[in-house]
Image: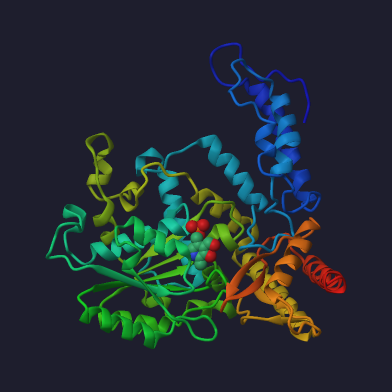
Amino acid sequence: MPNPIPSQNPSFGDMDPEAFRAYGKQVIDWIADYLSQPDKYPVLSRAKPGEVKAQLPAAPPAAPEAMGAILADFDRIIMPGITHWNHPGFFAYFAISGSMPGILAETLIAALNVNAMLWRTSPSATELEEVVLDWLRQMVGLPDAFEGVIADTASMAAVLAIAAAREALGLGIREQGMAGRPEVPRLRMYCSEQAHSSIEKAAILVGLGQAGVRKIPVDAEFRMRPEALAEAIQADRREGWLPFCVAATVGTTSTTSIDPVPAIAEICEREKLWLHVDGAYGGSAAIVPELRHVLAGCDRADSIVINPHKWLFTPIDFSAFYIRRPDVLKQAFSLIPEYLRTAEGDAGTVKNYMEYGVQLGRRFRARKFWMIVRTFGAEGMAARIREHVRLAGEFAGWVDASPDFERLAPTPLSTVCFRARPAQSAGADLDRLNESLMEAVNATGKVFLSHTKLNGVYTLRLAIGNIRTAEAHVAEAWGLLQENLERLTRYN
Ligand SMILES: Cc1ncc(COP(=O)(O)O)c(C=O)c1O
């Protein structure tokens, strides 16, 4: 984006506002061009390790540089090292979207640069957060007993949930810690073998240790087995553990399986355990009326997380954490030094979000979701999710109908788990073949797929979640898989 516009204010202040205006227009034009041709670049960056770094000066520039030169370097050096999550052929991990209203919102968020730690540090930020979280709660059909807090990620939401569950035990752990207290039994929590690693990481952070997380076996469709959970809790109690929390998943990372939350909730109620639901990916599907059943039983949970930054078109980051007893979360985390004390907060008339989590500094993320829901409408967002699920169903159908491929898990949402198993493959190393197939299709630059292992078997995943993905892109992925399989098996 070369253009010789002065970018320095001769004084010691910020950039010159007129230069900002001119470059701002250029940047917005660049974004509009980029997003109107999102498949112009290879989806998976072709940069070799160290290639980007080698083009960057090791030391910071001592003298001012022109914005035109900086933006030119962005095109020349940075762009080749970008993997394009906006590309409609991005099918890896969980595909996400930086939608245009979300991008506009991010720009305004940066411009205001609000820290939403206290109500008074921007009343609009706090009150909009309360409102948009309640909008999403209504959109997914959760009861109004749940109150929300925006977290950066579902990983942090898991920390909040487990810390709140621990606080609810009333063991004075906030004050006294857990170590060196013989009167405090070892705490144990439960999740399925298919739960996301963030649950275990959160447990590490909260001081349970990995031994404090017991992984419950899954059924043939990768869902937690409630009877195995019940047995594990009993066995642990006999051995002196204190079971206190279960994390169920609605939409596991590998296969998008949905744990049987109603049966798990039953156990949690009986055993008096905190139930956290990780709906980071799958929870979003509940905005589609005919998919609302994915959250069945979640009305009985103590906490639940849904990630608009995964499947609700919100640029990273935005994770919606809902809790039935926000007072417990506050009890776990509220710590008000004198310099943050406010009369409004003390009177209990306003919410100071810093009291409901770990970080003090909080971005004005609510604004993104506000602009996105208003731009697309709740029904428009549901229509997009519905289409993604339909496209995944189409792809799953092609896999099922092919003699050379097979599906390795049910497809309840928008992610298909499958592998190549060519008719003439007897004796072939299918794991190697599928890894080579994935590398071959990814090398085309047109699609990006990732993998997992299911029952020890190398499994390809095609995850649909980008707002720009249409049927043609899914068909292209299928065509590339078939062509490349043909090529790989022909020469082997
Ligand atoms: C089921 C599930 N839970 C949690 C996470 C972690 O999400 P985040 O990146 O917001 O921490 C993921 C990420 O893919 C996930 O799939």
Q: Is residue 215 left or right of residue 105?
A: left
Q: Is residue 111 left or right of residue 436?
A: left
Q: Which of the 4 quarters of the picture holds residue 438?
A: bottom right
Quadrant of the image containing the N terminus: top right
Q: Is residue 22 left or right of residue 110?
A: right
Q: Looking at the image, can residue 364 be seen?
A: yes
Indicate the position of residue 262 as horizontal and vertical percent values: 41, 83
Q: Which of the 4 quarters of the picture holds residue 473?
A: bottom right
The outermost residue toward the top is: 10
Indicate the position of residue 301 as horizontal and vertical percent values: 37, 74
| 478 vs 325, nearest the viewer | 478
Please tell me whether residue 31 is drawn above or below residue 445 in the rendered image: above
Q: Which of the 4 quarters of the picture holds residue 17?
A: top right
| 133 vs 88, nearest the viewer | 88
Indicate the position of residue 153 as horizontal and vertical percent values: 47, 55
Q: Looking at the image, can residue 414 be seen?
A: no
The outermost residue toward the bottom is: 227
Indicate the position of residue 209 as horizontal and vertical percent values: 32, 61
Please tell me whether residue 354 is drawn above or below residue 292 in the rendered image: above
Chosen colour scheme: rainbow
